[in-house]
Image (cartoon, rainbow, N blue to C red):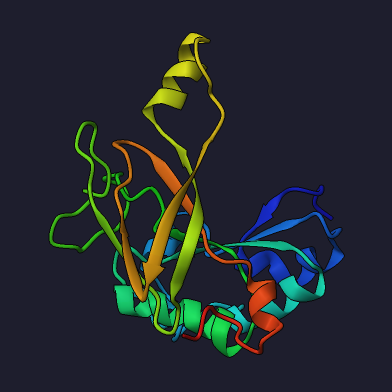
Amino acid sequence: MRPSGTTLSAPQLPLACSRRSTTGRCAFRAASISNTYHWQTNVTEGNTFQWATPFDTFASVAKSTQAQVFITVNYGTGTPEEAAAWVKHSNRDNCYDFKYWEIGNENYGSWEMDVNTRPHDNKHPTSSLNASIKIDGFRFCGPTDVYTYGIPQDEAARTGTGLADVAQTSVTMSGPSTTYTPAPYSATVIKLRNLASCHARGDCLGDPR
């Protein structure tokens, strides 16, 4: 049995996560495998074997143990359509309500698989890059919480001057798609609408209008 708070990857999950307390965390997929893993076939790029734990099995165990779930989609060899289909399968088709999704693992690193036209370019030391965000069937509808950690927080942690905590802001996002501009060398989490309110209307993903 692993101590509470340890992150588990999917191959370990059926045995270990089922013994955990409700404060546990479960990750799917973990580390560099994330950038080569195709969730629909349950295989990684260049391999023919399937992993022992497909996503729906992982989800079933995670939900039954009330674990907090963190999912990393395939940035290195996947497509935006593949990632969007995964979110739809999880939160709309099956109502797993998993909130935390990451696009790729350490995408800036040369050690990661990246077959995109401009590999390892998702972060830049000085330039802000625009991101377009769209989820089929989802409509952004008003104030949205955004959490960021970047150069100011990193410098505050290094020098002891300023605030090193994650910064929280609120931005207005509306319509079937939106854009956001992350700061240079930053990690950004966008908190979408509370899914509980959608369940009350029978719509597990978002505003149906």
Residue 69, image x and y in percent? Answer: 65, 63
Residue at image location 64% in from the left, 83% down from the top? 95
Tell how many labels.
0
Task: Report the residue at 19% width, 63% height from top.
Answer: 116
Residue 21 seen in the current view: yes
- What's the residue at 75%, 63% (across, down)? 67
| Residue 54 visible in rendering | no
Which residue is farthest left?
A: 117
Q: Please state the horizontal and vertical placement of residue 107, each as a whole percent of the image.
A: 33, 50
Q: Nearer the viewer, residue 34 or 187?
A: 187
Residue 26 location in percent, x, y? Answer: 67, 61
Residue in the foreground of this view, choosing between 55 and 160: 160
Location of residue 20 in the rendering, given as x and y in whole percent from the top left corner: 84, 60
In the visual, does 42 lie left or right of 55?
left
In the image, is residue 176 above or below residue 180?
A: below
Left or right side of 11 for 120:
left
Residue for point 40% across, 76% down: 135
The N terminus, quarter of image: bottom right
Picture quadrant of residue 131: bottom left
Task: State the image quarter where residue 155 is shown.
Answer: top left
Viewed as shown, does residue 207 lie left or right of 96? left
